[in-house]
Image: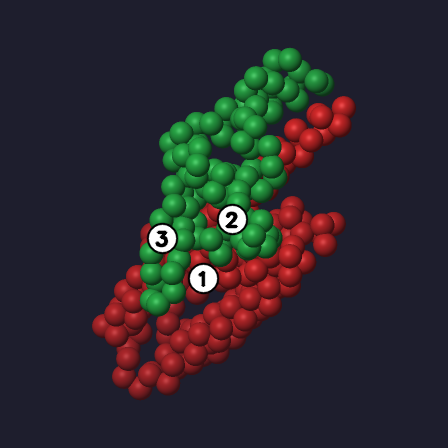
Chain colours: A red, B green
Amino acid sequence: MTETNKHLEDLTQIRTMMERSSRFLSLSGLSGVFAGIYAIIGASIVYFSDTYSNFISGHYSIEGQKNKLFLLIGIAAFVLFASLVTGYLFTSRKAKKQGLKIWDKSAKLMMSSLFVPLITGGFICLMMLNMGNFGLVAPFTLIFYGLGLFNASKFSFIELKYLGLSEIILGLIAIIDYGYGLLYWAIGFGLLHIFYGTLMYLKYEKDKA
Amino acid sequence: MKGFNQLNKAFESRVRLGVMSVLMVNDWVSYSEMKELLSLTDGNLASHITALDKLNYIEIEKKFVGKKPQTSYKATKLGKTEFEKHIDGLEKLLINNK
């Protein structure tokens, strides 16, 4: 019987080491939930300011509106920054609990596969803003973020793959349903993050703390 | 017992099991990364690495990163095949003992 137990432990060890060395499993679902909440707050601020009424058509004239554009970009940047900081805090807390280092081989692999599509998309969006073409910015950010997540899911939780696919589909719908960028942004960065973040938290973290 | 003859003595130690598991799913892994992943001390890892290298189950590459020497490891084709056989044997033993 002890012989059997040893074999079983061996197999468990093999599986754990394969996963731990190739997948970044410290990512906390709570980072997704909070990123979603920040995104919804940010989107509401934009929606209820008068900036949005000009923005909705996608034909936003740049003359005299530059300050309002900066407000939009400022809010978006702040949401991104707050999400990254909160995400880092929750993830490092989870890594500590698991006795792992946050910045290991798998984290590097995941980050590089996420950020290559993300930075490409970010550059394209900045160029479009610069050319005064605002309508496609929201769909493109969703699509490139989705591509990044889809790519990164190979080195982390499988849920990231489905979150990525959902973001891509949402981005494509936002192109067809042109002119409602903010709404799709709020769904993609807000609701989807909260949904998948909660799912991951319940599946991997609750009861295992 | 079925499956028993498939077990490989070379993989009996937990450390070697760990090293091979990591190398099955990663290409080159450095010494320090390996140490960290398996939560090991220096002397412990080195002797097992040497043993696996002697059997030609792993490849060793030494190079300089900046001024620091860095040693990396990769599983050979033989190593992977042997390790798969070993896992297969473990599974068979467990199924038969149920």
Badge 2 and badge 1 in a common chain? no
**Residue designated by label 1:** A185
Find the residue positioned furthest to the right.
Answer: A1
Mark 3 residue element: strand
- Asked whether disc 2 touches disc 3, contact meaning CB atoms under 8 Å apart, the reply is no
| Residue drawn where x is 66% and y is 22% of the image | B94
Q: Where does the image place residue A172, in percent across and percent down from the top left? A: 36, 51
**B75, above or below B45, in the image:** above
Label 3 marks a residue whose chain is B
**Residue designated by label 2:** B46
Mark 2 residue element: helix
Label 2 marks a residue whose chain is B
Give amino acid for label 3: Lys
| Residue drawn where x is 47% and y is 38% of the image | B52
**Residue designated by label 3:** B62
**A15, above or below B69, in the image:** above
Give the position of the N terminus of chain A as an image quadrant. Answer: top right
